[in-house]
């Protein structure tokens, strides 16, 4: 079953007084774009986390937020150290702001001490191997939750798109059924017009039929209707696929749109043109919905 690129997942876990919270948000994107925001004690495993995301998802803009919270008892007595490179960076930036804005105020200790992440733990939070196992387990739960939501969204989109495809197919049946009527109506109109212009003189039936045949050939959209119906067959097959098919669906619906445009350009029948406009509108809706398919 197809999957949407819209999803959300959250999971929590604890290890030795440390609470790990993982939150995932994903939206549609042409490719897979992953952003992982995590505290420095967990940065050792960022590459493994990214690799796991790529194994589960193939498209979408995905943001993962990982937070850790330690119990007060666990924090008691923990030694801290100063992040000197970050402190220097902050100081240089503050001096740059002062210079750019021509400020007279000096950079103070109070300003610097309030900067984020200046004080870090001088001790490891806990056993690294145990922390890694818990972290990756929580990440896995959050990914599973996000994937489940994307599947549910995909199921709903699938039903909507199948209904749209069915409507297009119904309109194609109407258009094709009207083809012979259009030719017959044209022949009658042409016959009447010629009689008016010739004051009732005998008609050259051969010439009349030739003109009708030329018109029928120019306005014949049978080939376009057949190709569009064939595209619809492929469309339904892709909707039932288990692998990501968003790009294939997008290409296929573009081809469906081209066939509908050709039909509209060739049609000289008002009723058929109105139905073709309805077909084009439904295809445009399908194209918009497909933008969120993985």
Image (spheres, rainbow, N blue to C red):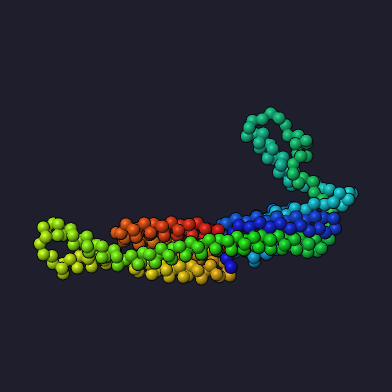
Q: In the depicted view, which residue is nearer to us: 57 or 276?
A: 276
Can you give x and y, in whole percent of width and height, for residue 266 in the image?
Answer: 31, 61
- Quadrant of the image for the C terminus? bottom right
Q: Would residue 151 be seen by someone viewing this image from the given angle? A: yes
Q: Residue furthest front?
A: 200
Can you give x and y, in whole percent of width and height, for residue 124 in the image?
Answer: 83, 56
Q: How many marks?
A: 0
Q: In the depicted view, which residue is nearer to us: 90 or 165?
A: 165
Can you give x and y, in whole percent of width and height, for residue 131 in the image?
Answer: 80, 60
Q: Would residue 45 be seen by someone viewing this image from the given angle? A: no
| Residue that appears at 60% across and 60% down | 153
Q: Answer with the quarter of the image where residue 261 lies.
A: bottom left
Check the image and report above or below for 108 versus 175.
above
| Residue that appears at 34% across and 60% down | 272
| Residue that appears at 36% across and 57% down | 274
Can you give x and y, in whole percent of width and height, for residue 166 in the image?
Answer: 47, 65
Q: Answer with the quarter of the image where residue 259 lies.
A: bottom left
Q: Residue furthest top?
A: 104
Q: Is residue 220 left or right of residue 244?
A: left
Q: In the depicted view, which residue is nearer to us: 19 or 233?
A: 233
Q: Answer with the quarter of the image where residue 154 lies.
A: bottom right
Q: Is residue 245 left or right of residue 209?
A: right
Q: In the depicted view, which residue is nearer to us: 209 or 232?
A: 209
| Residue that appears at 41% across and 63% down | 171
- Quadrant of the image for the N terminus? bottom right
């Amino acid at each position: 079953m197809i999957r949407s690129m819209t999803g959300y997942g959250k999971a929590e876990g604890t290890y030795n007084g440390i609470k790990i919270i993982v939150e995932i948000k994903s939206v549609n994107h042409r490719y897979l774009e992953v952003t992982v925001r995590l505290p420095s004690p967990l940065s050792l495993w960022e590459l493994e986390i990214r690799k796991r995301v790529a194994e589960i998802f193939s498209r979408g803009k995905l943001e993962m937020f990982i937070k850790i919270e330690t119990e007060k008892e666990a924090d008691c007595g923990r030694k801290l150290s100063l992040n000197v490179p970050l402190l220097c960076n902050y100081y240089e930036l503050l001096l740059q702001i002062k210079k750019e804005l021509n400020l007279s105020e000096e950079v103070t200790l109070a300003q610097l001490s309030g900067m984020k992440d200046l004080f870090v733990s001088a001790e490891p939070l806990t056993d690294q191997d145990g922390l890694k196992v818990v972290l990756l387990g929580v990440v896995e739960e959050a990914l599973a939750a996000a994937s489940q939501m994307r599947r549910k969204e995909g199921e709903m989109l699938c039903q909507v798109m199948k209904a749209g495809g069915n409507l297009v197919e119904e309109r194609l049946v109407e258009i094709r059924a009207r083809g012979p009527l259009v030719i017959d109506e044209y022949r009658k109109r042409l016959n009447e017009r010629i009689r008016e212009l010739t004051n009732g003189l005998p008609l050259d039936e051969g010439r009349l039929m030739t003109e009708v045949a030329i018109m029928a050939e120019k306005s014949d959209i049978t080939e376009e209707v057949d190709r569009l119906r064939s595209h619809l067959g492929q469309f339904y097959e892709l909707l039932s696929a288990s692998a990501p098919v968003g790009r294939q669906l997008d290409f296929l619906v573009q081809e469906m749109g081209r066939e509908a445009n050709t039909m509209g350009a060739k049609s000289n029948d008002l009723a058929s043109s109105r139905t073709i406009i309805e077909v084009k509108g439904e295809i445009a809706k399908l194209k918009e919905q497909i933008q969120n398919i993985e």
